[in-house]
Amino acid sequence: MMSRSSLWGLCLIATGTVASVLANQKAHHSLQILAGEKSGRFWSVWHGPQGTAVNPCNAEPFELVLETTDIRVQNSVPEDPPLLPKVTWGNPSENQPRPAALAPGECVINGNGQDGPPTLKCKDMTVDFKKDAQFRDAGIICDDNTKYIRTWTAEY
């Protein structure tokens, strides 16, 4: 019987999650974008190991690298994840946080605010985020009543 992580890896390969520039390299890292709600709605971006879904209530070994309140989520659950606003996260000129595994100033997450997934753009690579495989699963509710849904994932 195939392990869950092996199945996840096959799903990633089948859906082309890793950009063609990385076709000959094994992904080691994951960026996961979750939409959340507590006293308002927010985005959170998590960096961690490839092939593992972050649990925002107990995130180890993931690192929260960004949280922002600029979110517009429909009231009903859409077929596709909510789109990121037209934004660049990790912009060094704005002193925004970025994943520790990425060189400062070399990688940003871009949302175009209109259609399509966000992208991770680094000095020597571009990776398109994909709809998180667990997007339609039940939301996550933490002990402090913060609610999360999985939206976008990039593995590189």
Image (cartoon, helix red, strand yellow):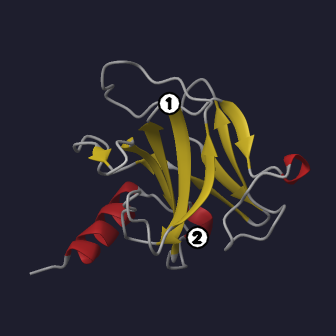
Judge the density around disc 1: few (<14), some (14-19), many (≥20) Cα neighbours within 10 Å. Answer: some
* 148 to 122, vertically: above or below: above
Quarter of the image for the C terminus: give it: bottom right
Out of 148 and 26, give the one closest to the viewer. 148
Image coordinates of residue 4 in percent, x first then y, are 21, 72
Left or right of residue 63: residue 122: right
Mark 1 = which residue? 41
Look at label 1 and name its amino acid: Arg
Out of 148 and 39, give the one closest to the viewer. 39
Look at label 2 and name its amino acid: Leu
| Residue furthest out toward the top | 75
* 151 to 72, vertically: above or below: below
Judge the density around disc 2: few (<14), some (14-19), many (≥20) Cα neighbours within 10 Å. Answer: some
Image coordinates of residue 86 in percent, x first then y, are 69, 29
Who's the residue at 38% across and 49% down the image? Answer: 132
Give the Cα separation between the discs numbered 1 and 2: 34 Å
Q: Is label 1 in a helix, a strand or a loop?
A: strand
| Residue furthest out toward the left | 1
Between circles 1 and 2, the one closer to the viewer is 1
Q: Is label 2 in a helix, a strand or a loop?
A: helix
Q: Note whether residue 106 is visible.
A: yes
Who's the residue at 38% across and 65% down the image? Answer: 58
* 111 to 72, vertically: above or below: below
Residue 22's label in the rendered image is 2
